[in-house]
Image (spheres, coloured by chain):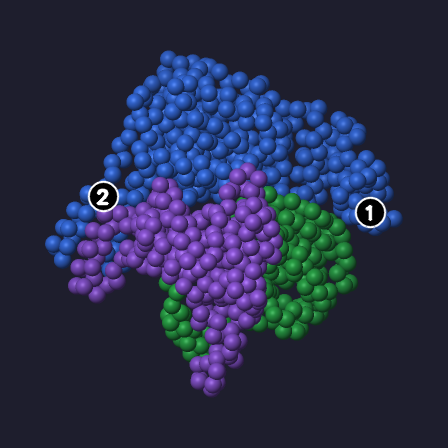
């Protein structure tokens, strides 16, 4: 908590830099720029300038100001992977309405997403795929209200979701247009 | 960013990048601070959220309402006096039924903003983008300014841990044993204050955290004022 | 070093507070300072809980629970501990009491009970935690343990995993709800709570049945409820045996008593239905089916119960129960022809089964009964696929 002097922080920074140079550690965040392609995750998307990307092998997560304030994720999961809060499962060939229902039930059954309200739930087309668009709001246990937009679809055995979540006050509206641009640029590298 | 860190480490650059110089500062400032701060003469202070814990021998924190109330008064008094010396009036916002919802909206978001500021501009590695363009906001705060006819909002919160007799004694034993065994000695508690100056649009113009390892007692007005002085030592000159 | 240890022991012993406290059921009992702080923290936590959106909005059920609580304790004790029972929308089997007497019962637990005597057992147990000041006793005990551990830490130069008990006072609810109390305090709550129940005239034979219900559920959920208060120490079977022993000894002369089944069903049937929906959303199909069947047994003429049973069967995705689902939807439609939901369920199921003409008919009926349906776009898409 001793943050008035930054000498300690500088030492840590220099040590971290040495470790990076020595290949001992990787940085947790990278600045975003241009097209992001993940062969392993089978998607490509254009990321906005001035945001930071979490260095993760799994899903793509970017934020501008901090995860609590706003973030965009692109997630990919095989349909047989259990969901976090519901025992319901997705399956190949499910209709978008049924997929959306399972995803909503998963959120509804979460003890972290308090006071969840689905504001919009409708079918959409995502490239060649039939999918759905959800807009929902919830609160966390600190009382902070979030708003999210989620576009999801099934491509064969894989469920893809592109989601934007931000603090409802100020941040959601601020970066919604940026999210819409990310969304428009999303494509599968090898369509199912 | 990686390239910057590499260059800094290898000493290949004459001057450090701008974000890195800002990273070294104890405070964070909005890029348009100088212009926006010129009109600030009256601050509407949200009631300082001060939590004072009794720290027992086992390191258990016991929140003390009476101490916290005393801390709130002492910190507010300290803020008023220190800012008065700089020609700025501080008026505490009365949070009645009509103000409760707007104040809560702002403070709940502020907690998330503050935590993001700490995470991405104080901790390592920081977001260079946020250091270059420190543009955090809590959304418009007109309703929090109106009642006090103020120009900006002041948000302060903090914690203090006061050791109980048991912990103090244990610390004494720890010092003896630490000297013998070379093991670390338990701390006697921390004091920390966080302050943010927010303009009408909600932009966080100036932000700082100060911490100390047991040297202050926020219940005591003199000690609280001394800590506030330290906190705002590099506060921008306003109302020029 | 020996001297230092002796000094340390002295410091620790001097810091120990007594954990012996007289119950608040007696006269001349006043709250102690740390207890008052626990009560204030509890109020803060309750305010947060009240704002969280987790409260179950059903005034009738809540009023009924409070009425039962009033039968279990005298007005004098109510003045000292202002008991209030609230219901949380949560399908997990749980209930917990804050030290200031505010009790939260999950819909999941309430929905599993069969009568008022079982409800009284549950409330009696929770009220005992408050009257016997279990939170402050546990808190003091924790403080003492921490002090002891801190001493060990200082002496030995640090042990991993022993940090500050951050937010102990901010986690009263979590302590009561998840961690539970020590085995001895839980036993005391069972014993004293049971005595309240019998004193209030309820049938003692119903108390062990509550534990049987919980045991059955724990098995069904494959001890997912191991983290839950009601399945923790002492184990459910042991707790049931404790009250069975009391029936054989202390209450051997008592036979029968109040169960108030009819009023209990009337006041809690909506909870059963709502909770079954929560179970269904969480994919706990067996629990959802049991809840729906229970509701249908209470209110056989209510279309909503039959519709829910149809949904449970349809959403399992098993073709073997499709006929049953169709039968339930048809029962729901027969009970209330203007009720749109079973038409949708029927349509979706028939779409799944490949019977597109029937699916289309049912889905069109759904939209005609519910022209403003917020899933209209989806349903129209299904209808297009049926053409």
Q: Which chain is green?
A: A
Q: Is residue C233 left or right of residue C159?
A: right
10 Å neighbourhood of mark 1: few (<14), some, or many (≥20)? some
Colour seen for chain C = blue
Name the image quarter holding residue C242: top left
Residue at left offset 72%, top offset 54% = A133
Residue pictured at 37% horizontal, 70% vertical: A8
What's the residue at 39%, 35% (across, down)?
A: C39
User: Is residue B189 visible in this depiction of the protein?
Assistant: yes
Pointer 1 residue:
C380
Q: Colour of chain B?
A: purple
Residue drawn at the location 59% of the way across and 35% of the way down: C275
Q: Earlier in the sequence, mark 2 or mark 1?
A: 2
Q: Residue A69's x, y, as percent? A: 57, 57
Q: Residue under label 2, please give it.
A: C15
Chain letter of mark 2 equals: C
Q: CA distance from mark 2 to mark 1?
A: 72 Å
Element at label 2: helix
């Amino acid at each position: 908590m001793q943050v008035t002097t930054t000498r300690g922080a500088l030492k840590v920074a220099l040590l971290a830099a040495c470790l990076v140079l020595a290949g001992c550690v990787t940085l947790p965040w990278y600045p975003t720029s241009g097209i992001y392609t993940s062969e392993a995750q089978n998607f490509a998307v254009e990321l906005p300038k001035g945001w930071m990307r979490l260095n993760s092998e799994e899903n793509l997560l970017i934020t501008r100001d901090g995860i609590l304030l706003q973030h965009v994720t692109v997630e990919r999961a095989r349909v047989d992977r259990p969901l976090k809060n519901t025992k319901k499962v997705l399956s190949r060939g499910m209709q978008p309405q049924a997929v959306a229902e399972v995803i909503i039930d998963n959120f509804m059954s979460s003890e972290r997403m308090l006071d969840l309200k689905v504001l919009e739930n409708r079918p959409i087309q995502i490239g060649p795929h039939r999918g759905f668009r959800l807009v929902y709001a919830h609160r966390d246990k600190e009382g902070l209200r979030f708003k999210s937009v989620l576009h999801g679809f099934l491509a064969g055995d894989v469920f893809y979701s592109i989601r934007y979540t931000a603090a409802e006050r100020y941040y959601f509206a601020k970066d919604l247009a940026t999210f819409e641009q990310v969304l428009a640029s999303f494509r599968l590298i090898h369509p199912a | 960013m990686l390239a910057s860190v590499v260059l800094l480490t290898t000493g290949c650059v004459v001057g450090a990048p701008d974000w890195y110089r800002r990273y070294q500062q104890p405070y964070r400032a909005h890029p348009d601070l100088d212009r926006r701060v010129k009109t600030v003469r009256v601050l509407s202070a949200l009631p300082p959220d001060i939590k004072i814990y009794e720290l027992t021998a086992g390191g258990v924190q016991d929140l003390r309402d009476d101490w916290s109330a005393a801390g709130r008064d002492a910190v507010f008094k300290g803020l008023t006096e220190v800012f008065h010396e700089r020609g700025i009036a501080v008026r505490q916002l009365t949070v009645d039924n009509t103000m409760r919802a707007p104040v809560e909206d702002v403070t709940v978001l502020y907690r998330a903003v503050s935590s993001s500021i700490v995470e991405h501009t104080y901790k390592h590695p920081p977001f260079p983008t946020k250091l270059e363009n420190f543009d955090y906001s809590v959304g418009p705060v007109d309703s929090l300014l109106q009642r006090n006819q103020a120009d900006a909002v002041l948000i302060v919160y903090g914690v203090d841990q006061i050791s109980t007799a048991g912990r103090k004694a244990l610390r004494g034993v720890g010092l003896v044993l630490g000297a013998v065994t070379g093991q670390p000695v338990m701390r006697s508690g921390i004091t920390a204050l966080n302050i943010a100056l927010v303009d009408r649009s909600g932009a966080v113009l100036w932000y700082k955290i100060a911490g100390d390892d047991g040297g202050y007692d926020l219940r005591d007005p003199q000690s609280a004022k001394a800590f506030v002085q330290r906190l705002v030592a590099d506060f921008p000159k306003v109302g020029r | 070093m020996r001297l230092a240890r002796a000094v340390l022991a002295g410091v620790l012993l001097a810091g120990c507070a007594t954990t012996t406290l007289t119950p608040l059921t007696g006269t001349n009992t006043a709250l102690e300072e740390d207890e008052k702080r626990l009560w204030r923290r509890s109020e803060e936590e309750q305010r947060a809980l009240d704002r969280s959106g987790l409260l179950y909005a059903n005034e009738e059920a809540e009023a009924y629970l409070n009425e039962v609580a009033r039968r279990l304790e005298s007005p004098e004790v109510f003045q000292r501990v202002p008991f209030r029972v609230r219901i949380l929308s949560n399908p997990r089997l749980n209930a917990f009491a804050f030290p200031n007497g505010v009790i939260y019962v999950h819909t999941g637990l309430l929905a599993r009970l069969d009568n008022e005597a079982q409800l009284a057992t549950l409330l009696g147990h929770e009220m005992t935690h408050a009257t016997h000041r279990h939170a402050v006793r546990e808190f003091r005990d924790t403080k003492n343990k921490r002090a002891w551990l801190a001493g060990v830490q200082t002496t030995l130069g640090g042990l991993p995993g022993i940090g500050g008990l951050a937010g102990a006072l901010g986690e009263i609810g979590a302590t009561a709800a998840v961690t539970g109390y020590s085995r001895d305090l839980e036993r005391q709550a069972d014993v004293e709570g049971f005595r309240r129940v019998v004193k209030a005239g309820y049938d003692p034979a119903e108390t062990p049945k509550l534990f049987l219900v919980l045991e059955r559920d724990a098995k069904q959920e494959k001890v997912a409820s191991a983290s839950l208060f009601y399945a923790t120490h002492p184990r459910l079977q042991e707790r049931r045996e404790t009250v069975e022993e009391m029936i054989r000894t202390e209450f051997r002369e008592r036979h029968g008593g109040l169960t108030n089944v009819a009023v209990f069903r009337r006041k809690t049937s909506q909870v059963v239905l709502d909770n079954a929906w929560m179970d269904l959303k969480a994919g706990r199909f067996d629990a959802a089916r049991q809840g729906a069947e229970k509701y249908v047994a209470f209110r056989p003429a209510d279309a909503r119960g039959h519709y829910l049973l149809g949904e449970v069967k349809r959403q399992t995705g098993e073709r073997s129960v499709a006929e049953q689902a169709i039968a339930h939807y048809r029962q729901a439609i027969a009970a209330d022809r203007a009720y749109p939901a079973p038409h949708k369920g029927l349509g979706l199921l028939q779409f799944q089964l490949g019977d597109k003409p029937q699916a289309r008919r049912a889905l069109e009926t759904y939209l005609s009964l519910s022209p403003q349906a917020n899933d209209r776009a989806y349903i129209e898409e299904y209808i297009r696929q049926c053409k």
